[in-house]
Image (cartoon, rainbow, N blue to C red):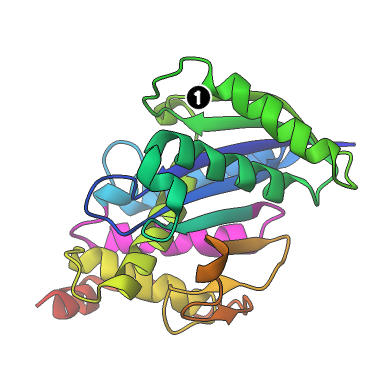
Amino acid sequence: MTFIASFADESGTHKGCPCYTIGILNIPEDFLPVFNQTIEQIYNASGLQGEIKWEKIRKSSGQVNLCTSILKFLLQSPCTFHSIAVSKEPYRKWHSSEEAAFFTTYDFLLRQSSQGLNSKFKVYIDQKSTSYSKQDEVMQIITNHMLAKLPTSSTIEHVSMENSKLHWGLQPVDVITGAINSGYHLFFDENAKIQTAKQITIARMAKILGWDKLQYDTYPNDHFNIWHFPPETRAIPGTRNIEPNFTIGDISREEFGVMCT
């Protein structure tokens, strides 16, 4: 049985955003040293200061290229990425208890992302303030209970909330999850106030996936999966296969400058 290190983050839970997304990046433990080294190299080439975060993608071609380089690397690696993009308005539980609703979808995603790999998982979640100090332990118990009902040998061995500054794995998942949520936000409101650098990044990431926009859910697959939730939101605006286009190169300073004017 293989061992997997899983890194999870979320985007869009704040007021005023019509959707939120949770993403999980699964990295085989024997690939983790190569993963960490590669992400560090991509980071060093970007000129970004401090940790890698979607909120920092604001004003340079280097920041855009950081995100697209991460996506291309992940698509060509043994890593898998799974996300759940939640439309808040039709999700009834969100309107009664946002925290309970959020962790319910977290549990759903943990189950969905782990069931096909038949592995033992250690899950590291970016720190989030919660009213219950042992929420990570509860998530582990609930998810293992769900997995026990499925034809899989996967188990969640460990769940903990961690400081993203200490884990390279938590930083790329922040970027990919943030981009997916911002792209989905633009589906709900094409005039949403999202910085130009982010919109350029979203468009280029969509092209790398073989899409025209970063707004779709995916057909079920085990490598790069976007799941729209609740069920009535699936296939809206559409469902797509991932058809990677690795010919999308870096954007130059000049191109970036023209697009920002």
Q: Quadrant of residue 30?
A: top right
Q: Which residues are magenta?
A: 57-80
- Give the residue furthest to the top: 133
Q: Position of residue 187 (x, y in %)?
A: 34, 74
Residue at 50% across / 69% down in the picture?
A: 233
Image quarter of the N terminus: top right
Q: Is residue 28 above or below residue 257?
A: above
Q: Magenta segment: does it hold 60?
A: yes
Residue at 44% across / 70% down in the picture?
A: 205
Residue at 52% across / 49% down in the picture?
A: 23
Q: Is residue 257 above or below residue 42?
A: below
Residue to which mark 1 is pinned: 161
Q: Quadrant of residue 19?
A: bottom left
84 left or right of 163 in image:
right
Q: Position of residue 70 (x, y in %)?
A: 49, 57
85 left or right of 146 in image:
left
Q: Position of residue 28 (x, y in %)?
A: 73, 41
SS class, disc 1: strand
Identify which amino acid the numbered label 1 is placed on. Met
Q: Visible in this render: residue 159?
A: yes
Q: Nearer the viewer, residue 171 or 183?
A: 183
Q: Nearer the viewer, residue 112 or 102?
A: 102
Q: Residues within 10 Å of mark 1 (few under 14, many from 20)?
A: some
- Give the residue furthest to the left: 261
206 left or right of 104 in image:
left
